[in-house]
């Protein structure tokens, strides 16, 4: 199984500041045949299901604000929120869909400083 | 836009069978380019993928090793839905269960069902 490890486990950032969350996979999630990284990011607010933010490591989902961006390749990935808003308080998860079983990171709790 | 609506009981007795259904709108369960998944979430296990079904000329099923001997995911083309059956449950199966799709990353999620395993 591919193990996904996020860092940090929790993060406090001031409003308007940048937030950065890291995700590392135990195996390469890049398919060389199509040069795509099979990595997604989700946001989960309390009491709600996760919401897709980013797929193919860097493509924003429908309606996702452009302050959210994803980067990285191979085994190391980053989710960046360029200017933190109050509504961004949530838990963030990375997920690999390169190979079954499809695995998630343990989550990063983001709060306002 | 794909929407998923879950239904099923929130309380199951130990050793019995957990059964949930996920109704699909905005897509079809037999879409050759789609896959339909069940995922659960608990404080001890985090987000845990349980399995999926998908159709490409025939139906395929793919299950997590941790539940492989106890799980069945069934598509129902007549009702455009898919179901989860988890047999011989124990308190460790207590979690919020989600259906999700329509690919192997999840644009659509069900609302979640808290299933408690208790006598």
Image: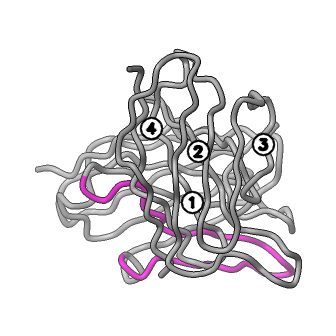
> Residue B31: horizontal and vertical position, in percent?
85, 62
Specify the subunit that label 1 lies on.
Answer: A
Q: Residue at point 39% right, 55% down? A: A106
Read off the magenta span: B44-66
* For the residues bearing labels 4 and 1, Cβ distance under 8 angstroms: no
Figure label count:
4
> Residue A72: horizontal and vertical position, in percent?
69, 61
The residue carrying mark 4 is A91
Q: Residue at point 46% right, 76% down? A: B64
Which comes before the other along the chain, label 2 or label 3? 2
Q: Are marks 2 and 1 on the same chain?
A: yes
The residue carrying mark 2 is A42
Which comes before the other along the chain, label 2 or label 1? 2
Tell whether A19 sits left or right of B18.
right
Which comes before the other along the chain, label 4 or label 2? 2
Which comes before the other along the chain, label 3 or label 1? 3
Q: Residue at point 78% right, 42% down? A: A60
> Residue B116: horizontal and vertical position, in percent?
24, 46
- Name the mark on residue A60: 3
State yes or no: residue A51 in magenta: no
């Amino acid at each position: 199984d591919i193990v996904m490890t996020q860092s940090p486990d929790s993060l406090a950032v001031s409003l308007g500041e940048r937030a950065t969350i890291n995700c590392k996979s135990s195996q390469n999630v890049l398919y060389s045949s199509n040069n795509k990284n099979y990595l997604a990011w989700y946001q989960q607010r309390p009491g709600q299901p996760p919401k897709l933010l980013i797929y193919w490591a860097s493509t924003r989902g429908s309606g996702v604000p452009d302050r959210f961006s994803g980067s990285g390749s191979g085994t190391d990935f980053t989710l960046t929120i360029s200017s933190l808003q109050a509504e961004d308080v949530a838990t963030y998860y990375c997920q690999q869909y390169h190979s079954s079983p499809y695995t998630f990171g343990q989550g990063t709790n983001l709060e306002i400083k | 836009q794909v929407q998923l609506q879950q239904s099923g009981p929130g309380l199951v007795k130990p050793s019995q069978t957990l059964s949930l259904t996920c109704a699909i709108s905005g897509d079809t369960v037999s879409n050759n380019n789609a896959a339909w998944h069940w995922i659960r979430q608990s404080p001890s296990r985090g987000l845990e993928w349980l399995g999926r079904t998908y159709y490409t000329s025939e139906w395929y099923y793919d299950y997590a090793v941790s539940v492989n001997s106890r799980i069945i995911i069934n598509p129902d083309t007549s009702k455009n839905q898919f179901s989860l059956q988890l047999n011989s449950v124990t308190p460790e199966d207590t979690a919020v269960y989600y259906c999700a799709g329509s690919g192997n990353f999840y644009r659509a999620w069900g609302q979640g069902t808290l299933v408690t395993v208790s006598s």
